[in-house]
Amino acid sequence: MLLQQYVVLTGDEHFPMLIPQVSILRGARRADFLCFVPVSRFQYQKVAVLVDRPGKDAKVITDEDAAYGLEGFVVKRIVIDPTDGLSYFIRARGLCLWLQAL
């Protein structure tokens, strides 16, 4: 749902596309999405988007972020909490705005 809403928001603009379920780290959980944000003509910021549920252990989060950081990725976490009332559209819009700010 997050990817569908993201595509609706970004449409056919020149905008970084989310690449689902790419394996980066050996023996670790796959990132939910990757994208490469253009910084200059031949430079890109690598971003790993991780979709989490509330209540994940802080140590696990820190370890995952450090592992992706060693590979040169900036980590963006999106917490899906059904009790907060936020739609996937709002979460995808937040991701788009965050990517534009990079």
Image (cartoon, helix red, strand yellow):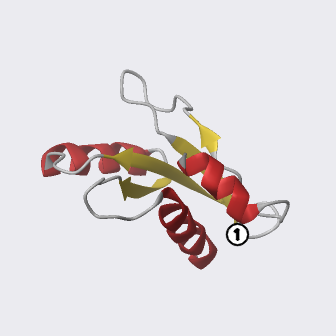
89 relative to 55 in the view: left or right: right
x then y, percent, for residue 83:
25, 58
> Residue at the location (29% across, 54% down)?
81
Q: Quadrant of residue 46?
A: bottom right
53 relative to 69 in the view: left or right: left
Q: Is residue 46 visible?
A: yes
For mark 1, give the secondary structure: loop
x then y, percent, for residue 6:
63, 57
69 and 96: which one is in front?
96
Q: Quadrant of residue 43?
A: bottom right
Q: Is residue 43 visible?
A: no
> Residue at the location (19% across, 46% down)?
56
6 relative to 79 in the view: left or right: right
- Residue 72 vertical placement versus 98 (above, below): above
x then y, percent, for residue 37:
67, 61
11 and 65: which one is in front?
11
Q: Name the residue carrying label 1.
A: 39
x then y, percent, for residue 24:
50, 32
Total numbered circles: 1
Q: Quadrant of the N terminus?
A: top right
Q: Quadrant of the C terminus?
A: bottom right
